[in-house]
Amino acid sequence: MSFSNTEKRPQKDHLFALFSQIAAAMANPHRLELLDLLAQAPRTVEELAQEATMSIANTSQHLQRLKKARLVVSEKEGLYVRYRLADPAVARLWLELRAVAHQRLAEVEVAIDAYRQRRDEFENVKVEELRGRLQNGDIILLDVRPEVEYENGHLPGALSLPLEEVEQKLASLPDEKTIVAYCRGPYCVMADDALAVLAANGRRVARLEEGVLEWRQAGHAVSNKI
């Protein structure tokens, strides 16, 4: 028995309406930033509000919209509520959205230049090169993200040195090795800022553009807190 498109139209409309719930939930720059932060590590509403420089009330509203679309889940921890991505597929969706935007919108490159004004100042190390240089022991790999993100997952062999601690702990880094820093990936400025401090103090530096998300997406193993 066959059915015409007209007979099946309500069911098809409902199906595509369900798909649109995901797109609608993501169609806000603040919610995308929250997804980006949660892709690095689970966080409470208060922690997310501080990182995203939003009020707790606004942050909570955005999280509820993401939760309604089942992109994030939450769990109660005493007086606090901690959020995390509902599934690794959500992180992959975020990566693909970024990639398509970068490929199709010329304005993205202009915006990156405005945000990451130092990105052409430092040598870029490729993933394949990084592996070899780590094995040879001629570099130090620094994860300059907040410690909570490092503990949730970091590149093998990386040391945790949050951006705000770089200057005060500079003396603890050996000066005979090149220091390679990474942060949340190519749309993050923390590694640039850390390298600027290190370079100003006479250290040899380089940046790894990829972060933990990109590293995982490429199929490489990630280490947890040591």
Image (cartoon, rainbow, N blue to C red):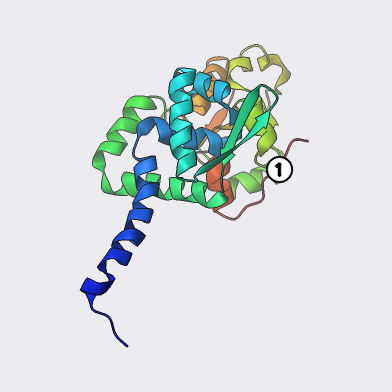
Residue 32 appears in the figure: yes
Task: Please give the name of the residue rendered at 61% of the width and 25% of the height, measured from the top-left corner.
Answer: 146
Position of residue 149 relative to residue 100, above or below, is above
In the picture provided, is 191 more to the left or to the right than 80?
left
Task: Return the x and y of residue 208 as percentages of the image width and height.
Answer: 53, 38
Q: Quadrant of residue 31?
A: top left
Position of residue 85 relative to residue 176, above or below, is below
Question: Which residue is tagged 1?
Answer: 223
Task: Return the x and y of residue 128 as percentages of the image width and height.
Answer: 58, 51
Task: Please give the name of the residue rendered at 58% of the width and 20% of the height, measured from the top-left corner.
Answer: 163
Residue 186 appears in the figure: no
In the picture provided, is 158 more to the left or to the right than 124?
right
- The residue furthest left is 6
Depth check: give the residue in front, 138 or 102: 102
- The residue furthest right is 226
Q: In which quarter of the image is the N terminus?
A: bottom left
